[in-house]
Image (tube, rainbow, N blue to C red):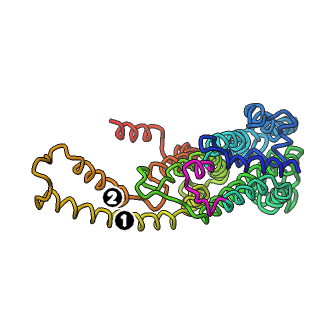
Amino acid sequence: MKNVLKNDEAISKLHAPSSTPYEFSLVVGGPLFQLVRRTHLSGDALELVRRRIIAITMFAWGPLLILSALNGRAWGAAVRVPFLLDAAVQLRMLLALPLLIGAELVLHTRIRLVIGQFMGRGLISETSRARFEAAIRSALQLRDSAIAEILLIAGAYLFTFSYLWPQYSALNVNAPTWFADPVGSGHRLTAAGWWRFLVSLPLFAFILFRWYFRLLVWIRLLWQVARCDLRLMPTHPDRVGGLGFLSLTPFAFEPFLAAHGVVLAGLMADQIFYHGAKLLDFKEEVGVVVGFVLLMVLAPLLLFVPHLAAAKRAGLRDYGSLAQRYMREFDDKWARGTAPADKPLLGSPDIQSLADLGTSFDVIRTMRLVPITRDALVPLLVVTLLPVAPLLLTVISPEEIMKVLFKALF
């Protein structure tokens, strides 16, 4: 009941004047958020992010360090893969996990006013207002669903023991590692290993899956908004009919993208350092991961392509007809001498109107059908691949890299 009242209060803000922004958050809600608030790890607007990062990270990583150290496997040559030299674990727990936690605040700050722009800019027609409000109400209910988070927890454990267990078991073939010892044809987990598979990996998987769930909520919401009757302006200077504010939304997911690059870099590093793999062996994996995460954050914007295409066609048709009528009258008046003799051409407002009309038609002609630009795509690609860049040192010496950079800069 409390969540229903909260959702209704949020929806009621849609009827406020356009100067009052309507806030919609993908992350401020759900049972886990309420639990984090009660444990004083977050405020109502995701404050205390440092406290939250430290607490969750230490819960997942701290016992691994302590238990492996007590077992003499945290460092040194006693085992094939010491804990502190396991790149996949260190990068996942000490970098990717904090990135995913801190990304919540980034997403909340940058996305919370986006949906309100549809109302504030008058992009939703009155006939679709009820549908628009219903879409937001449905998104809020789905975001706050306890059943969804229970399923995410179950999915995290299922993923850990059906996929991660056999994958990571490959690291301790014929030799003990910090988390397991070979026993016959199987493996025996150490205390650190049990904590890893029962707590650390499921916790990380749950937080990651929760991000995927939020993205699905976001995609579903934008899909429902795209089904509304939108009042796009083909002459809008942003050249996307007034939807230019959507082109900034992918940047809100930069820490989320970077976390995937970190996880990928850790897995690649372990294979390179302990199994003799080469960096170029992972071309397909890199392509799949980069393509997947970019598709997740950019695909929702493609939902507005039909609206933009229709607005462009209508704009070219309407402004083409308007330009035809204006040019005919302008030609009759000034080129064929029907204008009064005492009315000078220099300084006439007709000239300025002609230029303005030409500018408007040019804006429509160059209107983009997708609210995505190359300026947005390149930074997202760089953020995703940047964590993998240090692995270039396994195939190229630092001196060669410096030479390439020196030639590029000078």
Q: Are marks 2 and 1 in contact (CB under 8 Å)?
A: yes
Q: Can residue 282 be seen here?
A: no
Does 128 lie within the magenta span? yes
Q: Can residue 254 be seen here?
A: yes
Span shown in magenta: 115-129
Q: Earlier in the sequence, mark 2 or mark 1?
A: 1
Q: Position of residue 159 (x, y in %)?
A: 79, 60
Find disc 2 in the rendering and name its residue: 361
At 64% from the left and 50% from the top, the residue drawn is 260
Find disc 1 in the rendering and name its residue: 316
Q: Position of residue 96 (x, y in %)?
A: 68, 44
Give the answer, above or below, for where 121 lies relative to 164.
Answer: above
Residue closer to the observer: 268 or 104: 104
At 87% from the left and 37% from the top, the residue drawn is 38
Q: Is 408 positioned to the left or the right of 343 in the image?
A: right
Q: Quadrant of the C terminus?
A: top left
